[in-house]
Image (spheres, rainbow, N blue to C red):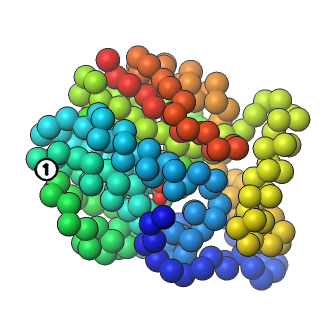
Amino acid sequence: MHTLSNQPDTLYASIKTTPVPFEFNAQVADVFDNMIQRSIPGYNLLLEITGLITAQYAQAGSNAYDLGCSLGAASLKIRRNLPDDSHLVGVDNSAAMVRRWRQNMARDQGQASIEIRQQNIQDTIIDNASVVVMNFTLQFIADHQRIDLLRRILAGLRPGGVLLLAEKICFTDAERQALMMQLHHSFKKSQGYSDLEISQKRVALEQVLIPNTETQHRQRLLAAGFSRVERCLQCLNFVTFLGIKS
Ligand SMILES: C[S@@+](CC[C@H](N)C(=O)[O-])C[C@H]1O[C@@H](n2cnc3c(N)ncnc32)[C@H](O)[C@@H]1O
């Protein structure tokens, strides 16, 4: 298991009288490594898969992108699996995340050159790419703008290039939705979060993180022009898709 910081996440441990929408600010960045590992079942496995996919699809002399790169956990896996003549671009619009990405990547000995862009992923130029990773970030983009972003990613990929897309999903079947939410709640409790922490975080995320169904994701990826879409990982209500450009 990787560790980018040791600070435990207690951000929602005390009662919040006025709920504030979730933001990727400095307090979140300080505890984010701990938060994401305790909140997303299968997160460490996804990082391993990110490395495998990179090794399989990265092309010599191409660019790789980590969109919504946060502290750089996926960026590190990508870099370690890129050909030496590649270039890795991390993109995140949170200043606190970008600062920590720089620190974490500076400790890495990888050969591929690196660059961090503090900007909206919807504005970033994607070109000559063979691997694009966007883990748990599309869900924060306005729903009606998601297709345009996927089209821009596809346009920036070389033939044979891939998008690895991980997202929290929801279900149209009410029973399945309730079961998955309950199991996710149990997962977070097993990671040491209290009922209060879980419910306060859920309220904070409600208006900010808008999940789609698996069908919506598949249809959108195909509509954006990906010729093949494979589900390569699912843990409860968290799914990872591999979109391949022919
Ligand atoms: C859930 S985190 C991603 C986790 C990360 N991919 C990982 O695997 O560790 C979402 C990240 O996306 C960034 N983000 C959200 N919306 C963004 C946008 N429109 N443009 C750039 N970054 C964005 C946030 O600042 C945050 O760091």
Amino acid tagged 1: Asp
Q: Position of residue 173 (x, y in %)?
A: 83, 29
Res. 125 visible in picture: no
Q: Residue, x 35% and y 54% (percent of image)?
A: 77
Indicate if the residue with disc 1 has its beta carbon within 8 Å of ligand 1: no
For this orientation, the residue located farthest to the right is 175
* Residue at 20%, 60% in the rendered image: 110
The residue lying at 18 percent from left, 49 percent from top is 87
Label 1 CA crowd tier, 10 Å (few <14, some 14–19, many 20+): some
Q: Is any part of residue 17 visible from this angle?
A: yes
Q: Is residue 16 left or right of residue 115?
A: right
Name the quadrant containing residue 55. Answer: top left
Question: Is residue 113 depicted above or below 246 in this figure?
Answer: below
Q: Is residue 91 above or below residue 97?
A: above
Q: Looking at the rendering, which quadrant does residue 12 occupy?
A: bottom right
Choose between 87 and 212: the one closer to the eye. 87
Residue occupied by mark 1: 84
Q: How many marks?
A: 1
**Residue occupying the point 75% across, 79% down:** 13
Label 1 secondary element: loop
Rendered location of residue 169, percent (x, y): 66, 40
Q: Is 33 situated left or right of 195 in this image?
A: left
**Looking at the rendering, in which quadrant would you find the C terminus?**
top left
In the visual, does 15 lie left or right of 55?
Answer: right
Q: Looking at the image, is 169 positioned above or below residue 105?
A: above
On the image, the x and y values in percent for residue 226 come to 41, 21
Q: Position of residue 190 (x, y in %)?
A: 75, 65
Question: Foreground: 14 or 131?
Answer: 131
